[in-house]
Image (cartoon, helix red, strand yellow):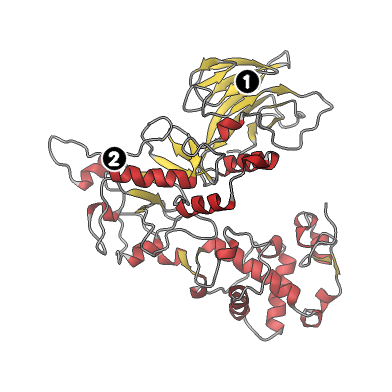
Amino acid sequence: MAEVGECSASNSSIQNWAKLNIEINSDEAVIFSETKSSSVDKYEWCKITRNSDVNSITLQNRSFNAILVDETLVQKDDIAFIKCGSEIVSGPVQDGHLSYKFEILSDSIICKGLKISMDVEHAKCSICLNIWHDVVTAAPCFHNFCNGCFSEWLKRSQEKRTSVLCPQCRAVVQFVGRNHFLLNIAETILQEDSSLRRSVEEIAILDSCSLIQSNLVIGSGKKRTQKRPHSVLGQEESGVLELPCPQCGTEYAGFRCNPNTVHLQCHGCGGMMPSRFDIGIPQHCLGCDRAFCGAYWQAQRLQRSGTYATCNPETLKPISSRTVSRIPQLTHENNQHEQDITERCISQMGTTLQDVISEWIVKLNNREIDRTRMPLNHVEMITAETHMCNECYDKLVGFLLYWFRISTPKYLLPGDATERENCWYGHACRTQHHNEDHARKRNHVCRPTRSR
């Protein structure tokens, strides 16, 4: 699948000729839309085909719902003919859905970025009536809200109803997740019109209410009526298992799920666990906001079995409890020559990789390191006791090894490393990724002195 803002195309040799919310550079393309926080879940939005007159296209609706094309309703899988200036609304009505304008580009126009034509009113949360803040998307209706606003709605709904209804259309919400694509749109709007920004106090209140970090699976709270009881095994065989997690059927550590319990899907194993915000047990990696169930089920003293998918507790651990025996592949921007120099440097100093990382974690904890380039979320909140997944820990190790290298005196480096000149572009150099000779002859573990 293509990434957000890209398309899957059959002929990539043709220059950009049109734009919708992306640049289109092929005679036929399928456009995708991302509606969840995880970048692995994307959905076909529409298929476009350039017609023989080269000034129009045929658009096929590939989305789950009907869409509007020039105020005409186009049902799922139906087609419509689009021309320059056509307006396309991503839902059956204009209110609450993004509006796109189709344009034909002349040969002299070079598009360098994403451009969306939309009414600012469509980028507002229907609960607080302000521009989205940390926007989340509810499914299957795909309406969007502030994280804090929807989190409060979710808590009140669970107290009063058996189902969580969308605040905008009252459809039953089955999933909700953060939407990074729309977050970028909201930030662009606020950059263009600062009068739409909220006060620092309002943002702080919203952030304190925000409970949605990764995709939530929301149960309907309804119990199936059956003429005769079925065993769990029978439900598995029929594909309608009603117990998504171990605590739905059995009490562990004094807790048992009720019909309204919201569940998180583990990024590691795909299994489910109840979303619990007030128990002090980490369920998310702070570095990436993804959910992992290993630490939670270990705290609940659940014995792993084949009945439910559960993670190894090692998948989410405090930084201080982790060990490292190898330099992660992504260290020094995946430059293997720089990784080799770092490894030899550590060996020459008579220490170990684990000792180096432990020393620099202490410096991190004491806030002795500039965190600007740390490739993780919530960088100012990270401490030695922060729970982190394996992937984010590798990123942290790579970040700390960068600081280790640039802080190491030149005379402690291997002899062949001291003879190299610094690359003008330093760690940001793109040439090092495709030019082996350049990657070897220049030092790239340094700050850029030029920008591209």
- Find residue 240 and report its horizontal and vertical position in percent: 28, 40
Relative to 273, is 1 on the left or the right?
right
Residue drawn at (70%, 69%) of the image: 402
Residue drawn at (79%, 62%) of the image: 439
- Find residue 139 and report its horizontal and vertical position in percent: 43, 36
Taking depth in this image into account, of 251 and 192 the one nearest to the observer is: 192
- Find residue 311 and report its horizontal and vertical position in percent: 40, 60
Mark 1: give few (<14), some (14-19) or many (20+) Cα within 10 Å. some
Taking depth in this image into account, of 401 and 193 the one nearest to the observer is: 193
SS label for mark 1: strand
Q: Which mark is residue 87?
A: 1
SS label for mark 2: loop
Q: Quadrant of residue 33?
A: top right
Relative to 277, is 15 on the left or the right?
right
Q: Quadrant of residue 46?
A: top right
Give yes or no for contact between labels 1 and 2 (Cβ–Cβ under 8 Å): no
Which is more foreground, mark 1 or mark 2? Answer: 2
* Residue receiving disc 2: 161
- Disc 2 marks a residue whose amino acid type is Arg
